[in-house]
Image: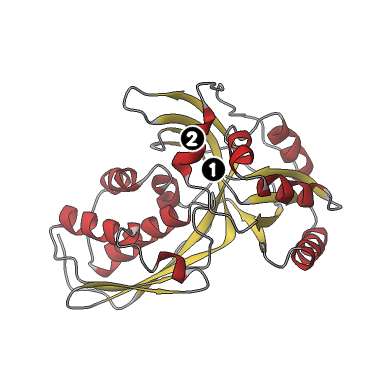
Amino acid sequence: MAAAEASAVGVAALAKLNLYLHVTGRRDDGYHTLDSLIVFAGIGDRVIASPADDLGLQLTGPFAQVLAGDPDNLVLHAAHLLARAGGVEPRAAISLEKNLPVAAGLGGGSADAAAALRALATLWNLSIAADDLAALALDLGADVPVCLAARAAFVGGIGEDLAPPPPLPSAHMVLVNPGVALPTAAVFGELGGVFTGPGRFAEAPTDAASLARALAARSNDLEAPARRLCPEVDQALAALTAEPGCLLARMSGSGATCFGLFANAGHAAAAADRISAGHSEWWVELAPLLYDPVANG
């Protein structure tokens, strides 16, 4: 199944954004079922895998220190799973450039794991069917399959059900994280047993304003419990909402990162500058909205 190894392989691990997120139920095994529209932002981490005699992980980037003491990194889990599936020894020097905040609702760990699967499959020259690779991704986490696919999708079930959305318009995002980690389990624990029906739509929004209107008719069901656990989410949403040209402000995933949707790149850039100047302790980034990003390169 494996041939000669390739040279170093780099893969972008882009931030995912939940434009809406409905919690539709809870299974007997405790997993919640979801319906969400997930897209990607033009910002993220980066995974580089190189040939080596054993398996190792080097962390770099502004948020590397947060993960430094965690022996359970999803990138290493992905490497071991893929090696077993491919019938090869897990040998690679992996570098993870950690640019995204941790436990932030951006799927950073999931994107890293998906990027590791892609990079190592190339490095080890593995021929694994797409469905099998997607199954490995789901074993790693609910957001890993969509991050592996690396294109906009309606996501259902516990993350395994991916369907293409209608064409979506160009837009610009301002991402704001108030510097507080929000563990996903804690947010779901605060949710309670109130569930929402699916929010999928078939009609293609014609521009950013019509996309914002479609999203405003939907919600992120995790936003209210996250705000109860982390009042800083309210502050981030208020800062985005107050900016001229902000069409919609919403929390992504289980938080605490929030995004502002803008039609105009200039308005988005000005908003990012003002929010950053007013809240120097926050992580504030400007990024285009990507629907079919090129993950390799």
Residue 48 position by quadrant: bottom left
Residue 233: percent from left, percent from top? 66, 47
Of residues 292 and 48, the one nearer the viewer is: 48
SS for callout 1: loop
Mark pair 2, 1: CA separation: 8 Å
Residue drawn 44% across the image and 51% down it? 147
- Which corner quadrant holds the N terminus? bottom left
Work out whether 47 lies above or below 143: below
Is mark 2 in CB contact (under 8 Å) with mark 1? Answer: yes
Residue drawn 30% across the image and 58% down it? 72
Residue drawn 83% across the image and 53% down it? 243
Which numbered disc flags the more N-terminal residue, 2 or 1?
2
**Residue 238 horizontal side relative to residue 35, left or right:** right
Of residues 161 and 4, the one nearer the viewer is: 161
The residue under label 1 is 254
Residue 151: percent from left, percent from top? 50, 49
Residue 131 position by quadrant: top left
Q: Which mark is residue 188?
A: 2
Q: Amino acid at mark 1?
A: Ser
Work out whether 231 lies above or below 15: above
Q: Which mark is residue 83?
A: none
